[in-house]
């Protein structure tokens, strides 16, 4: 029995944030009940509540470290299950800011598990925790509170299968991890609390993705290709090699530009990207499914950290707090960092303090949110206020990425910041800034693409 903060914690939602929360709460509560609307599979499978799993899910370096802190040995397990790996700079052909990042060792691991495999691995590890019980095929209908609304005392749930009557799960703590459709803001309002202020950045992002069979030699040993959108060419795409000899291609457009989901239209869209690499691969590849779409109209941040009061016994995590623009691959990593913050919070306090906890996770969200929205607002048609600082930083970043076409140390510095390993200020460190300036002075007027590499065995 752990040194308990209470008898029971209830987690709403069993996707990434819910599983990570359950892992942490199992060390602090006698019982943890995870309530999920879907039937939870016992293998790596797509499910209705997580439609985004059909699209590329990159794990940032800091996120991979955080997962390892929470689930010791999970990286090795994913490798055993066939997840391809490589070096982020050496083995992923990355075109960012209109330049091919010069390959070179970065020391940053690219762990390419598909989203269903990653979630299934974490779910299997949470299932075996003695304190944890899953209640799947159950809808969360609302919260229960004390008479004065000062404390959340549980959740109201309805079993989907038999349509049975609503039941109440009493709890010392409820954690909302129901993702972008979270109803906590509405529940707070119904209880007489202010809703958290909301910030939105509308990019009108549209994804389409398709899976293909991987044949040896197809990618010259690379484990991925990234063609990031730029203001001058606002379409992008990515290719990720995954377990079971497959690769997944995700294409995207912004502001109403949607990749088609008919097979020919999908391939033709790939041909319009700024660099031909993804289209070249698709040309001869064998598709394993049909293209599937996803719309992501806006990044949405609920500013829970600005609440001065909130009921006791209720916390919120993951996409329910902040839904990032997925092209930056931040959501799962930020959820993992929030789970680590929850663990630290529970170690510090005999009982969770929602207002203080929200401030802690607000600080975690700050950096990835400002990096992502700064990137989005570099696109002139994305509505939003551009600060002078943002414009200057975007200009500097463009120079850095141009330098990274020749200098792998600049590419490495960029990937360490994008991967949340280093703070953004690291890009302004004297050693990096000097390289950016030097690269600017010596750059030929039209930079040739970085040299290709000889074919070699696929890394698994
Ligand atoms: C297209 C796309 C691509 C993405 N790519 C990346 C990427 O490359 N890298 C990355 O790190 N992140 C990526 N993300 C973000 C990532 O998917 C999320 O950040 C991550 O899943 C964490 O979300 P979550 O667990 O908070 O919510 P979700 O994953 O949305 O899960 C919410 C869960 O709650 C359940 N639920 C909802 N309502 C109820 C209810 N009333 N009752 C019971 N259960 C309920 C749902 O069924 C679901 O299981 C992407 C997102 C999208 C949309």
Image (spheres, helix red, strand yellow):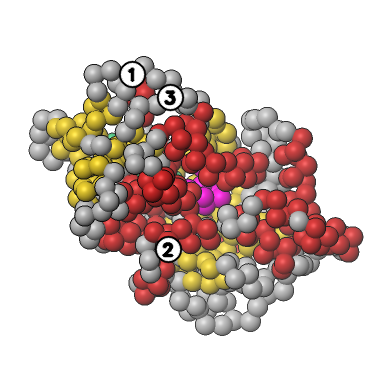
Numbered tag placed on residue 309 in the rendering: 3
The local secondary structure at tag 3 comes to loop
The local secondary structure at tag 2 comes to helix
Q: Quadrant of the N terminus?
A: bottom left
Say if the magenta span includes residue 95: no
Residue 307 screen position, x and y as percent: 47, 26
Please name the residue shown 70% across and 36% down the image.
Answer: 380
Residue 280 screen position, x and y as percent: 58, 66
* Residue 209 visible to the viewer: no
Numbered tag placed on residue 68 in the rendering: 2
The numbered mark, 3 or 1, whose residue comes first in the sequence reads: 1
Estimate the spatial distance between the alpha carbons at disc 2 and disc 1, rounded to whole Å. 39 Å
Q: Which residues are magenta?
A: 323-331
Q: Determine contact: label 2, label 1, CB under 8 Å.
A: no
Numbered tag placed on residue 190 in the rendering: 1
The local secondary structure at tag 1 comes to helix
**Mark 2 nearby-residue class (10 Å; few <14, some 14–19, many ≥20):** some
Estimate the spatial distance between the alpha carbons at disc 3 and disc 1, rounded to whole Å. 14 Å
Could you say which is closer to the camera, residue 380 or residue 364?
Answer: 364
Estimate the spatial distance between the alpha carbons at disc 2 and disc 3, rounded to whole Å. 34 Å
Name the quadrant where ligand 1 sits: top left
Please name the residue shown 40% across and 53% down the image.
Answer: 54
Q: Is residue 205 left or right of residue 78?
A: right
Q: Is residue 347 above or below residue 304?
A: below
């Amino acid at each position: 029995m752990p040194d308990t903060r209470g008898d029971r914690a209830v987690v709403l939602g069993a996707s990434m944030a819910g599983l990570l929360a359950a892992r942490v709460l199992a060390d602090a509560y006698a019982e943890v009940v995870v309530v999920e609307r879907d039937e939870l599979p016992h293998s790596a499978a797509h499910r209705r509540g997580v439609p985004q799993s059909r699209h590329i899910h990159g794990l940032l370096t800091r996120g991979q470290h955080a997962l390892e802190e929470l689930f010791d040995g999970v990286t090795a397990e994913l490798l055993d299950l066939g997840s391809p790996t490589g070096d982020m700079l050496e083995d992923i052909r990355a075109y960012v800011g209109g330049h091919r990042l010069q390959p070179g060792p970065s020391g940053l691991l690219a762990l390419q598990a598909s989203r269903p495999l990653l979630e299934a691995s974490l779910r299997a590890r949470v299932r075996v925790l003695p304190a944890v019980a899953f209640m799947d095929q159950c809808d969360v209908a609302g919260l229960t509170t004390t008479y004065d609304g000062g404390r959340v005392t549980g959740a109201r749930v309805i079993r989907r299968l038999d349509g049975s009557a609503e039941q109440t799960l009493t709890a010392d703590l409820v954690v909302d991890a129901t993702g972008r459709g979270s109803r906590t803001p509405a529940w707070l309002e119904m209880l007489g609390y202010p809703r958290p202020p909301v910030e939105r950045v509308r990019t009108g992002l549209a994804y389409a993705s398709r899976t293909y069979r991987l044949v040896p030699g197809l990618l010259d040993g690379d484990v991925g290709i990234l063609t990031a959108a730029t203001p001058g060419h606002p379409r992008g795409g990515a290719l990720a090699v995954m377990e079971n000899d497959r690769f997944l291609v995700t294409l995207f457009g912004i502001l109403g530009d949607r990749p088609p989901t008919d097979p020919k239209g999908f391939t033709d869209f790939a041909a319009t990207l700024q660099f031909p690499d993804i289209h070249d691969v698709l040309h001869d590849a064998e598709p394993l499914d049909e293209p599937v779409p996803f719309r992501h109209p806006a990044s949405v941040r609920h500013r829970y950290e600005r609440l001065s009061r909130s009921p006791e016994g209720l916390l919120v995590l993951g996409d329910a707090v902040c839904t990032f623009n997925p092209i930056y691959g931040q959501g799962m990593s930020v959820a993992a960092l929030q789970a680590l913050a929850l663990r630290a919070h529970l170690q510090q306090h005999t009982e969770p303090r929602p207002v203080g906890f929200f401030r802690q996770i607000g600080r975690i969200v700050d950096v990835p949110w400002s990096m992502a929205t700064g990137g989005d607002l570099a696109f002139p048609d994305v509505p939003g206020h551009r600060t002078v600082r943002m414009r200057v930083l975007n200009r500097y970043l463009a120079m850095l990425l141009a330098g990274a076409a020749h200098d792998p140390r600049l590419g490495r510095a960029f990937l360490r910041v994008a991967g949340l390993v280093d703070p953004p200020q690291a890009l302004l460190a004297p050693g990096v800034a000097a390289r950016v300036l030097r690269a600017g002075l010596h750059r030929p007027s039209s930079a040739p693409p970085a040299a290709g590499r000889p074919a070699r065995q696929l890394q698994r």
